[in-house]
Image (cartoon, helix red, strand yellow):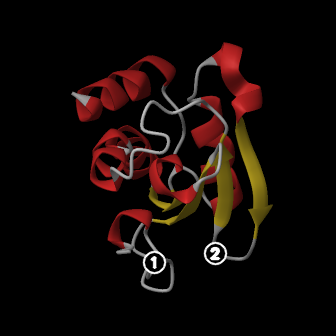
Amino acid sequence: MTKKNAKLNIQLNKPNQANNVSDLAKTWKQLMPSDGQHLFKITKVSNNTAYTEIHLHCPLRGTGNVEACYKLMNYDRTLMEEIGGELVVLESQSNSGKNYCSLAIRKKGQNMNDLTHAHKITS
């Protein structure tokens, strides 16, 4: 379902392919609901990585269910794939104790092995 919804968003909004990570992050944010733009933050952009945060109250907050988070974030990963990027969740509200999620975005095909994926962290 998340993949279909993301593809519908792409069809309706027709974003351009992004040429760099800054454009990827900006486009990701633009594809989010217009009345909630302030909840999606781009916190840092380096040569190959854009760092973002989602400040929505997640229904998974505090549950410890990072696998469910991984499944829900398929929407965002699909958006990124469609515009030339890849996205990983670095910190999930489900297990981080924080009231926001931290994400990293890179151009499609770049090595992501140096990023710690939230759903792969074991306690």
Residue placed furthest toward the bottom:
114
In the image, 38 versus 11, the foreground residue is 38
Element assignment for label 1: loop
For residue 110, the mark is 1
The amino acid pointed to by label 2 is Asn
Q: What x and y, as percent, mark residue 4?
A: 24, 27
The residue lying at 44 percent from left, 65 percent from top is: 118
Front-lying residue, 65 or 10? 65
Report which quarter residue 102 is drawn in. Answer: bottom right
Figure quadrant of the C terminus: bottom left
Q: Is residue 63 depicted above or below 87 in this figure?
A: above
In the picture, measured across the screen, residue 63 lies left or right of residue 96, that is: left
Q: Is residue 55 left or right of residue 94?
A: right
Give the residue type at disc 1: Gln
Q: Helix, strand, or loop for circle 2?
A: loop
- Judged left or right of residue 59, residue 69 is left
Residue at image coords 71%, 57% = 22
Q: Note whether 40 is above or below 105 in the view shown.
A: above
- Residue 101 position, x and y percent, is 58, 49
Mark 1 surroundings within 10 Å by alpha-carbon count, few (fewer than 14), some (14 through 19), many (20 or more): few
In this view, which residue lies farthest toward the top? 35
x, y percent for residue 71: 28, 45
What's the distance in space between the residues labelled 1 and 2, CA to CA? 8 Å
Quadrant containing the N terminus in the rendered view:
top left
**What crowding class fits label 2: few (fewer than 14 Cα within 10 Å), some (14-19), or many (20 or more)?**
some
Instruction: Tell me whether the residue at label 1 lies in contact with that at label 2, contact meaning CB atoms closer than 8 angstroms.
Output: yes
Look at mark 2 in the image and give the residue it sits on.
48
Left or right, 9 with respect to 42, comes to: left
x%, y% of residue 49? 64, 70
Going from the N terminus, do you reach mark 1 or mark 2 first?
A: 2
**Point 62% across, 40% down: residue:** 27
